[in-house]
Amino acid sequence: MYNRLSEELQKRIKEDRANNRKNPYRFSDADIIRRDMNRDKASIWRPAFVRDIEKIMHLPFYNRYADKTQVFSLMKNDDISRRFYHVQLVARIARNIGSVLGLNTDLIEAISLGHDIGHTPFGHAGERIINALYHGETGRYFNHNIQSARVLDKIADRNISLQTLDGIICHNGELECQEYRPVKLASFEEYDKKLENCYVEQEAVGRLVPGTLEACVMRISDIIAYLGKDRQDAVKIGMIQKESEFSGGNIGTSNAEIINNLIVNIIENSYGKDYIRMEDAYFDELVRAKEENSQFIYRADEGGRIINEQIKPMTEQIYYKLLKDVKEHDKASIIYRHHINYVKNINRYDDESDKWKEYLATEPNQLVVDYMASMTDDYFVDLYHYLFPKGTYGVEYKGYFES
């Protein structure tokens, strides 16, 4: 079942376009805020948020999306979604919604492409393991959305806009809302306080509210992008027989139905308004669909056993080995050669040539977390065997031809 916009709304949208009516709630390129307003000024061929998009896409860390788990780990299957594909799906869905609503689609794309760049290997399971280690050592919390902003703002000094960074930290694809109302963010001073709260208070991440409608659109699109796609992937690996096993209602059960029907309902209930909203019935079905995914896919994934029995102790051993090397200032160690020098290299064109030295002075646990969060799945496994050639842990990937 594929829903369509009402004839009334379609007529209104066409009339608005014919009369060049603009959405008054659209974020204007002219209002962009950067830490250094003397750099990265917009041009005709590189508008304000296009510069953010290109900075993100050309950052070496962006390449690493290609081998980071989205849902299913330790499986050789080129048809299973990796995080690279997910961020593109989010961008596409969010741009579709934003375009019809008359929002700033460049800002939407920048947030979408950058929102998971700080994600750990092995998905949310890897995130939980690293958070436990980091919090145990420092009393601070690790969250991948906060780390994504850190990558773009602190590790790589790319002068990314306040609006893009705020959208990234507020994306929280695990927490759905029926209505999203932006709360304007006026300065980096406010943003930095917002960010620090997430390091020191466990519940702070769940209270983050985006500062723009564009970020609100991206946030709900994150859920739309994975809800049906995870079901599609589960069918491909034989975890479930068919998507129609799920209850659907208005939103449907397949990936294509879910994307179409939620987009249509959001546009129908948000056009011309200063908030993003979906109807009660659609929101209830979205919540139910997420719970069904959790029951039949996420909690049923046998990869969870491997994560707990193998990946977790491997992470612990790597973490403390790297931490020891940082504290001892071992310049020949892997973390210096593969991470600290890597950061120096990606900032080599920075006007402040000593920027990487400031990074070198970062608290040791944070340096370790920065490095481990940046790893791809394969890199993590190879690093473990490099550091611990006689280690008792290891993982085997399920091959292409295994049933």
Image (tube, rainbow, N blue to C red):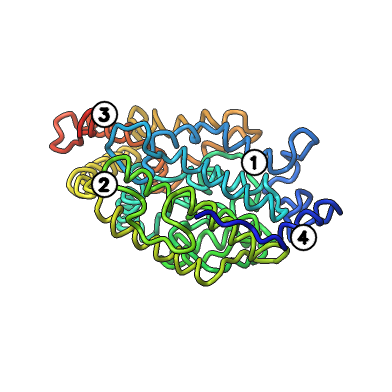
Q: Nearer the N terminus, badge 1 or badge 4?
A: 4
Seen in the picture, residue 300 relative to 41 is either above or below; the reply is below
Q: Residue 40's quadrant in the figure?
A: top right
Q: Which residue is mark 3?
A: 400
Q: Nearer the viewer, mark 3 or mark 1?
A: 3
Looking at the rendered structure, which numbered label has been put on residue 145? Answer: none
Q: Secondary structure at mark 4?
A: helix
Query: In the image, what residue type sits under mark 2?
Result: Met
Q: Residue at x 39, y 58 (%)?
A: 141
Circle 1: residue type = Asp
Residue at the spot of label 4: 12
Query: Which residue sits at x=50%, y=35%?
Result: 62
| 178 relative to 185 in the view: left or right | left
SS type, badge 2: loop
Q: Is residue 153 visible?
A: no
x, y percentage for residue 112?
Answer: 56, 46
> Which residue, given by chain and number where applicable, does mark 2 sit on?
239
Separation of marks 2 and 1 at Cα, in angstroms: 39 Å
User: Do callouts 3 and 1 mark residues in contact (Cβ within 8 Å)?
Assistant: no
- Which one is nearer the viewer's eye here, 10 or 395? 10
Query: Which structural element holds mark 1?
Result: helix
Q: Earlier in the sequence, mark 2 or mark 3?
A: 2
Mark 2–mark 4 Cα distance, whole angstroms, equals 44 Å
Mark 3 → mark 1, Cα distance in angstroms: 38 Å
Q: CA distance from mark 2 to mark 3?
A: 16 Å
